[in-house]
Image (cartoon, rainbow, N blue to C red):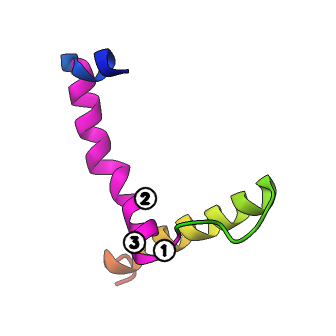
């Protein structure tokens, strides 16, 4: 993994990840306080995760002025 990240192509890909993926998880963990799931079982956990990221997407739409 270290060799893949240390290459020029790997650095470019990783820098894009920091700008697109990491803020989503940081927002959900810090602002929504999702540090652990409340339910058990894969289906229930997937449902809870989907609710959290739907809320994240709806907030992004609301804050972007989508409905003017």
On residue 5, the disc is none
Gap between marks 3 and 2 measured at Cα:
8 Å
Frontmost residue, 34 versus 53: 34
Q: Which residues are magenta?
A: 9-34
Q: Where in the figure is residue 66, as x and y percent of width and height?
A: 37, 76
Frontmost residue, 3 versus 17: 3
The numbered mark, 3 or 1, whose residue comes first in the sequence reads 3
For marks 2 and 1, give the one nearer the viewer. 2
Q: Where in the figure is residue 49, as x and y percent of width and height?
A: 62, 62
- Taking the spot 68% from the left edge, 67% from the top edge, the residue there is 48
Does the magenta portion include 20?
A: yes
For marks 3 and 2, give the one nearer the viewer. 3
Determine whether, in the image, residue 2 is placed left or right of residue 57.
Answer: left
Callout 3: few (<14), some (14-19), or many (20+) C-alpha neighbours within 10 Å?
few
Q: Which residue corresponds to mark 2?
A: 25
Q: Which residue corresponds to mark 3?
A: 30
Q: Where in the figure is residue 1, as x and y percent of width and height?
A: 38, 21
Q: Which residue corresponds to mark 1?
A: 58
Callout 1: few (<14), some (14-19), or many (20+) C-alpha neighbours within 10 Å?
few
Element assignment for label 3: helix
The numbered mark, 2 or 1, whose residue comes first in the sequence reads 2
Gap between marks 2 and 1 measured at Cα:
15 Å
- Taking the spot 52% from the left edge, 67% from the top edge, the residue there is 35
Element assignment for label 2: helix
Gap between marks 3 and 1 measured at Cα:
17 Å
For this orientation, the residue located farthest to the bottom is: 68
Q: Quadrant of residue 37?
A: bottom right
Q: Quadrant of residue 45?
A: bottom right
* Quadrant showing the C terminus: bottom left
Q: How many marks?
A: 3
CB of mark 2 within 8 Å of CB of mark 1?
Answer: no
The numbered mark, 3 or 2, whose residue comes first in the sequence reads 2
């Amino acid at each position: 993994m270290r060799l893949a990240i240390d290459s020029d192509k790997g650095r470019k890909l990783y820098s894009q990840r920091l700008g697109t993926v990491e803020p989503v998880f940081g927002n959900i963990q810090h602002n929504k306080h999702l540090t652990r799931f409340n339910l058990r079982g894969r289906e229930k956990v997937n449902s809870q995760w989907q609710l959290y990221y739907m809320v994240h997407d709806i907030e992004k739409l609301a804050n972007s002025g989508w409905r003017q």
